Image (spheres, rainbow, N blue to C red):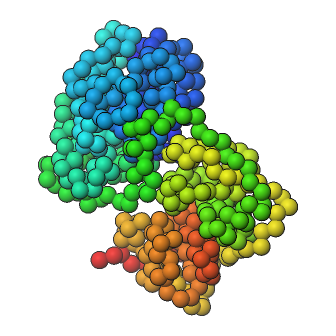
Amino acid sequence: MQVVTLEIPELGNHTHLVHDGRQALVVDPSRDIAPVEAAAERAGVEIAAVADTHIHNDYVSGALGLARRHGADYLLSADEPVQFERVGVRDGDLLTVGRLEVTVLATPGHTRHHQAFAVRDPEGSGPDALLSGGSLLHGTVGRTDLVDPRLRHDLARAQWASARALARLDPATRLLPTHGFGSFCAGGDATTGTDGSLGAELLTNPALTQERDRFVADLVAGFGPVPAYYGHMAPLNRAGAGRAVPRPGRPVTRDQVTDAILAGQWVVDLRQRASFARGHVAGSVNVEYSSQFATYVGWLVPWADDLVLLYDTADDVGSALHDLAAIGIDGPGIHDLGPTSTLAASFRRTDWAGFRSHSGPRVVVDVRDQDEYESGHLPDAVHLPVHEVDRRGADLPAGELWVHCRSGYRAGIAASLLHRSGRSVVHVDDSWDQVSELAIATTVAA
């Protein structure tokens, strides 16, 4: 048995292709199925089955489209209400993919009808594989508040029981989760540096080392904010939206960009944050292209609102369109700023050394998440997480706003939002680690 793992950093997820040299099972593919098909072609195998461990809340699944393209079975819990034909599977079902034996394991918790897939090669000598999806992750589990926050405790108890059931498998089994690599679907920080086996989890994973009530309390208390677009992913996946080819970006003119801004639409500049600060189109917002781009655009821009992207590099806009399509945002307007564009709006940037040397009045705005703020913050900082800046920025005190985060990325987004609203801003574009190195005073929340 061979396993090919495809990393999807823009989603913080992994897709797995498990094969016997002839036929393959694909688990939890994203909307862009081309990398999976390329991996199968390189391995010289036929895609015979495709599975989703659950109805995903963080991205548009490509499983149905991949299965249809290859005439493969699409495996999904028989209890999931969906609007398309699938092979409904249940706990204990034993399937074959080539010579591989695939056992379906009910693992409710991350979602009500979550399943894992245990794969063994009866003719091979290597370890079995556990495709655990959003159930048991490396060092943590999937969060249990995404289906319905009111069910978070009930599903956390189910998650604990599911993890304990999986722990009864052979400790040498390879643990291959989908989440836990940067996705907001993870219920806690994933661990690194283990051998990736189920046995390693027996020593470190809270679901396997804590008694149930303590585990549930700690897990639920650690949940952070949920990106706003997550609420739209399950309905899209139940409708099989991932089958559709994403609509391409539609070029718009400079005048149309101006009209969009005047109409109150979101115009997002995906250039580097330093370039944006030096000069940008007044009324635009900066979300620098990175692996986090789609997460923050999907979080900040109201769902189904018109969107225009500004860019100066074709590769960046192509990547941005690809990443947005992965969360169901198709066909935004696109405009190439080009080298001759007049970009009259600007604001200041500095580092922590410049912050320390400033002696005038200012309002310090910390746009990190709550747990980051509580672990240590500047004594005079106003806490306003980046995803709340557009809604609550008007409540900030009067004065020049000095905006910071952990690395400068989120602060760049927040500074652009506040600048768009008419505030005078300074973007502190530096690593939080420099605060202690420069002996800038901090405090810890009570």
Q: At which x and y percent is residue 146? A: 33, 51
Name of the residue lying farthest toward the right: 340
Residue 279 occupies quadrant: bottom right
The answer to which quarter of the image holds residue 422 is bottom right
Reply above or below: 333 against 129.
below
The image shows residue 249, relative to residue 272, as above or below, that is above
Q: Which residue is drawn at 39% across and 29% down?
A: 84
Count of numbered labels shown in the rendering: 0
Q: Residue at image x 44%, y 34%?
A: 240
Res. 152 in view: yes
Q: Can residue 428 be seen in this view?
A: no
Q: Where is residue 62 in the image (x, y as percent from the top left)?
A: 48, 33
Which quarter shows the N terminus? Answer: top left
Residue at the far bottom in the pictured view: 360
Of residue 289 and residue 349, the one placed in the foreground of this image is 289
Q: Which residue is drawn at 26% across and 32% down?
A: 79
Q: Is residue 27 left or right of residue 323?
A: left
The x, y position of residue 208, in whole percent, is 20, 42
| Residue 266 x %, y % | 61, 62
Quadrant holding the C terminus: bottom left
| Closest to the observer, 72 or 44 | 72
